[in-house]
Image (tube, grey):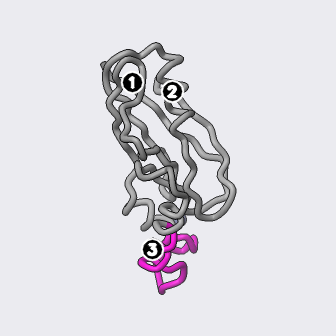
Amino acid sequence: MPISISLKTGSRVDMVDITSLVQKEVSKAGAEEGMCFVYVPHTTAGVTINEGADPAVCEDIIAKLKELVPPNAGYRHMEGNADSHIKASLIGNSVSVIVEKGRLVLGTWQKIFFCEFDGPRSRRVYVNLVK
Ligand code: ZN
């Protein structure tokens, strides 16, 4: 069974830094070396790794995605959230991070972000540790 992390997003579109939540699970599992696979089991949310130091980076990503995929552009999907599905596919729903000496190996400025595109909602992230 994969490890499951629950989170609540605060707005329709949001990038939530989940790095410490993922690191906590790696530490709890006692994983020393291997790969940490982070997977989002939703069709209107995703996960990405990008800069966490300057919040303007996430704001720019969100703004550019909105420009590329506007909310109402004559989509065929009846539910009214076609833009959310498209953004989720552009971002992707998994990332892999190397684990060394029990720590996620990330660059100085890198953070793992849960990307909400149809919130606010209760969401889940799966973490699987591979030796
Ligand atoms: Zn939909």
Few, some or many residues within 10 Å of mark 3 (<14, 14–19, 20+):
few
> Can you name the residue that lies furthest to the bottom here?
74
Residue 101 in percent (x, y) is at 37, 17
Residue drawn at x 32%, y 27% is: 35
Tell me, yes or no, whether the highlighted magenta stretch contains residue 122. no
Q: Give the numbered dot on residue 41.
A: none
Q: Nearer the viewer, mark 3 or mark 1?
A: 3
**Hey, what amino acid is under mark 3?**
Lys
Judge from the rendering whether residue 116 lies leftward or rightward of residue 104; answer left or right. Answer: right
Residue 37 in percent (x, y) is at 38, 34
Residue marked by disc 2: 3
Magenta region: 62-83
Tell me, yes or no, whether the highlighted magenta stretch contains residue 77. yes
Q: For the residue labelled by badge 3, is the local secondary structure a helix, a strand or a loop?
A: helix
Residue 1 in percent (x, y) is at 47, 23
Query: Which of the two labelled residues, at mark 2 and mark 3, occupies the earlier sequence position?
Result: 2
The quadrant of the image that shows the C terminus is top left
Residue marked by disc 1: 129
Residue marked by disc 3: 64
